Every structure is written in structure tokens, then in C-alpha cells.
Amino acid sequence: MISGPPPADEALRAVAELIAAGRVEEAARLAPSVADAAGLAAVIADAAARTEFLDVDMSLVRLVEDVLDRLSPDQLVPRARLAAKLAFELRGDPASLERRRTLLGQAAAAATASGDDAALCAALLAQVNSLWEPSGAPDRLTAAEGAIEAARRCRDLDRELVARLGRADTLVELGRVGEAELELATYARLVRPLGRPDLDAFVASRRSSMALIHGRLDDMVRYGEEAHRAAVAAGMPDADRLRGVYRGTMARERTGPEADAAITETAAMLIAMAARLPGHYFEADAASALVMCGRLDEARAELARALPSLLTSYGYRWHFAAADAAEAAAAVGSDADCERLYAALLPHEDAFVMLGPMFWGSTRQRLGPLALRLGHTGDAVAHLSRAVRDLDAIAALTWAARARIDLARALDAAGEPDAARRARTLARDTMRTLGMTRGLAELESVLADTGPMAWSLLRDGDHWVLDAGDERARLHGGRGFEQLRTLLANPARDIAAFTLDAADGAPPPDRGIEVLDEQAAAAYRRRLADIDAELDAADHRGDADAATSLERERQVLLAELRAASGLAGRPRTVNDAAERARVNVTRNLKRAIEQIGRTAPLAGAHLAASVRTGSACRYDPAPGGPERWRV
């Protein structure tokens, strides 16, 4: 039995064996007995990853930090390699962005000063694989190309292959798809004689992504299955997730029971990933999948969970998740959600969206629907027109077809029906050619929406434009129109008044507030009467700012009065906030419908007969109205 630490060379060998076996904590306990810090650094720098891609192995991180502290300033090569290793191991921590940048700068400086090509290659590869901001793509491309040259100088094929894969992915992100395909072909030729399933998985996954870009959907499925089989054979920990990504992506383009099941499985997988890997924005992806499933309330909840971290941090999956969040917000989010995501994505408007090898369209095609939802039709048309041009330029056929559907909606809202019709025709022709059955079904809905029995209520800046058969009206905005739009978008469905009324969608509190004295209550009632008169005047002159301010004051006063007493002075039995919401929404909807009726009497009569108000509100279409609404 050994009574003390083993000799130095045996200790180093033991640490290497423990790390190779994934027993990092045991290796860390033995590491202080290794006198050769440079040798220990080499062992750690060469250690293969043992965790799933986005997991952070904190035991290994702490070990790297400890050994890095032991190195002297003049030990440039081990310092360069360990700093690069530490940045790479922290890639799954969104909060470590600035630290990763610092470490990568230190690694590059030490490697350059050492003149060691292997150390330089390691530092450059860490930059490619540890920083993913959309604005950093040109720097990543430069780093990948430098790593290829350094790896070739020191005849390190493994590192050359990693660099070539990074170069191919970054070229796609920059829209240089033809060059990326050539790089992938070179990579495949180098990999073919090696017989390594992990490298075969990388080849197949990139081929699947290229097939999706160009609309070869059957090839995408075939290559995706090849990638999954190779990943399983290689023992890759995220093999099943890889398969789920391709199945879910295909389900976005195809209809049928298998596709519907894949979307449901994808949503469940993403919700589970959000619980297991917090901070990586999987809730945003789940929200997008749930919208496709028609589970809108769940989608809203996942979006609400995603936004706090999505808007305050920047991790590996940020751009991809922000694109998914934008799709969900445009469908089910609040105006505030749309505004915040629009502001977050706008600095990256010229970038394509990538997640590893997966191409996810352009940023502009997410900005367009957000702008349209917010009533900025000119911006929506500009974003989507540019998105179509950019996607056409790289033959991203599936994404260009989808962007044209959104462009048609924006053009309709901008009063350009001929241009909208051309966009829809091109989208339909492409989707038929590619077999995009889900997109075709969505397009048929859009075409039906623009038919003679479709009416629309669309926001244009501070106004609302009603198109109802032979009647057309441009109306001053107000909260009632926003609430009416929500009802029209959800026919024959009860929506709680407090959901319509609350800006943040929060449920009402469980109890009221302190009771007022009689004198204060009388003063409040007099002020409420004045506010009602001022609100009517503001609505008639279209002063939205004044109306908003008056409404805010009115709600505060009503809250105080309702908290004071119920009918005949009895204690209230109805939740105060819910009752306040019922009164507010009823009044807002009545005013909006009356305003419509003054300029579009048939539409006004239909809405008056169809909209039911109360604690729960509902749009039940009465006879004589449209078959559907565009809102």
C-alpha cells in the first residue's frame, strides 16, 4: 500500500489516465503532486471533451485554472494552450463572454510570441469555437484560415480538420455558400480514408444543412439519418439531440401525422433541455415549436420564460434562439415583447442565422414580421424585401419562399396588392416544386384571407385600417382596437378580461387595497366624471397620448373606489382587479366598435352583434360577416 504520493513521473502518468477516464476530480486532487507544470498543462490541453456540448465541466475548469496559475510568465506554449483550453471549456457559459475574450487574447499573444505553430493553431481554434456573436463572423473566418495554415505547417491533420469545419460553417454564416460547399468537399476527401464515425457524422450533418438551404428536403432527411447513425457509432453524447433537430426542421416544411408527431416531440425535447441546461434559451425554441403545434398559451408562457435571459446575456445559441423568439412573439407575444426583440435583433440585421451547421434563414426575415405586428409597415416591407434578395442570392430556396409569404402580408398592409400577389405566386411555385406542404397549407390560408369574404383590421402607425368588403376606414388608435384585434384573431374562444386589459398579462391580485373615506371617494367620483368627458374628447380628436394618460388615471381611481366597497356598501365578492378589467375592456371595446360603426356601418353592426363582453370576452361571428379576419 502506498503511504505517500507517487514519484513525479508516475503522478503525471496517473493524472493523464484519470483525465482520460473522465475522473477529473480525482485527477485534480493528485495534480498538486506533479512537479512538471508544463507537462501537466500539455496533458490537460490535449484532454478530450467528456460532457455534452453545452455542459460546462466545472471540475475541469477549476483544474485548468489551478495549473494555469502555476505556470511562470515565460512558459509561453503551455500558457497559450491552457488559456485556449479554458476559453473553450467555458463556451457553454453565456455569462463568461468577456472572460473568454480575455483568455483568447492571452492565448493568441503567448502563442505568437512563442513562435510555436501548434500553440498558435490551438489558440486560433479556440477563437473559432468559443465566440459566436454574429458580428464576429469575419474574425472567426480569419482565425479558421490561420488555424488551417498553422496545422498544415506542423502536420496536425486533426486540428486542420477542426479548422476546415469551422471555416465551412462560418462561410455559410457570411452568405458565401458556394465557397462553403467547396470547403466541405475538401474536408470530406480528407476524412474518407480515416474511417472515423465522429468525422463522418460531421460530414453528413453539413451535407444535410446544405440540402436544407437549397430545398432538397429528401436529401436533408437522408443525410440527417446518416449523421445520427455515425454519431451513435462514435458514442457522441448529443447524438439523439442531433436527430431531433433534423426531424424537427423537416417537420417545419412537411405536413402529415409523422411531421405533426415530430413537432410535438421537438417541443417536448426543447422544454426538457430548458430544464436541464438553463441559460441557453431553449425556452425560446420551445415557444416557436409550440406555436406550430397550435398550443398558443403554452407558447406565450415559454416566451415569457425565455426573454429575461435572452435580453440580458449572449451565449452560443443566442442568435438562433432570438430568431425563434421573434417568430413566436410575432404570433403570440405582446407589443412590448415584439419591440424588445426587434431592438435586440436590429444590430444584426445583415446577418444570417446559424446554429453550428444548421442554417436558419436571415435576421431580416424575423425583423419584418415584428415590424408588421407593431404597425411599421414600411419597415416591414423594407426588411422582408431585402431578406428575399439576400436569400435568393445564395439559393436558400426554402427560406426565400417563407420570406415571400411574410413579404406578401406586409405588402397587403402597405396597400400594394399587385406586388403582394406576385410574391405569393413565386412562393407558391417554389413550395410546390420543393414539396413544402406545410408552407403551401399556410399559403392557401393567406390566399383565402385575401379573398372577397375576408375582412382585415391592421394597424398602421397610430391608426388602424379596416377593410370590410365595400367598406374601408382609417381609424384613430386606442386600446379598444388592440383588444378587438385579439378577439378577432381567436374567434369562438373565451378570453379573460384581465388578460385583454393587463399590459403584462399578469393575473389579478388576490385582495383589494385600503378602503377610502367618504370624502375621498366623492372626490374620486367627481374626477372620474371629468375624465370620461375628457376621454371622449381625446378619442374624437385622435389624441392617443392624452387618452392613454387619462385612462391610466381612471384605472387608478377606479381601483381605489372598488376597493372601498361593493354594491350597496357590502364587502366585494369579486376580485377587484378582475372587475376593474371587465369594466375597462367593456368600455374600450364599445368605443372601438362605435367608432367603426360611424364610418363603416355594416362592419360596425356585425361587430356589435358578434362581440360579447364581461369577465370573459368572446368574438362569435354573427351572420353577414366575413369568413375570416386578417389582423
Image: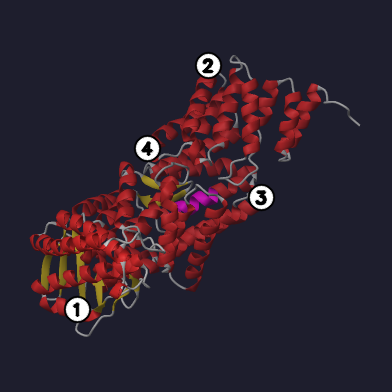
Q: Which residue is mark 1?
A: 608
Question: Disc 4 marks which residue?
Answer: 135
Quick one: quadrant of the C terminus? bottom left
Q: Of marks 2 and 1, which one's residue comes earlier in the chain?
A: 2
Q: Nearer the viewer, residue 451 or 511?
A: 511
Write the start and end of the magenta stretch as one range. 203-212
Task: Tell me which residue sits at (31%, 68%) in the image.
Answer: 565
Q: CA distance from mark 1 to mark 4?
A: 51 Å
Residues at marks 2 and 1 touching, judged by CB atoms closer than 8 Å: no
Give the CA distance from mark 2 to mark 1: 78 Å
Q: CA distance from mark 3 to mark 1?
A: 64 Å
Give the residue type at disc 3. Answer: Gly
Residue 47 falls in which quadrant of the image?
top right
Gap between marks 4 and 3, in whole Å?
A: 34 Å
CA gap, disc 3 to disc 2?
38 Å
Q: Position of residue 9 (x, y in %)?
A: 79, 23
Reading the chain from its start, which is encountered first: label 1 or label 4? Answer: 4
Q: Could you say where residue 629 lies in the image, as x and y percent from the top left?
A: 24, 72
Q: Is residue 208 magenta?
A: yes
Q: Nearer the viewer, mark 3 or mark 1?
A: 1
Q: Name the residue type under label 4.
A: Ser
Image quadrant in which the N terminus is located: top right
- Name the secondary structure under disc 1: helix
Check disc 3 and report the residue beneath it: 235
415 left or right, relative to 212:
left
Pointer 1 local density, CA inside 10 Å: few below 14, some 14–19, many at least 20 = some
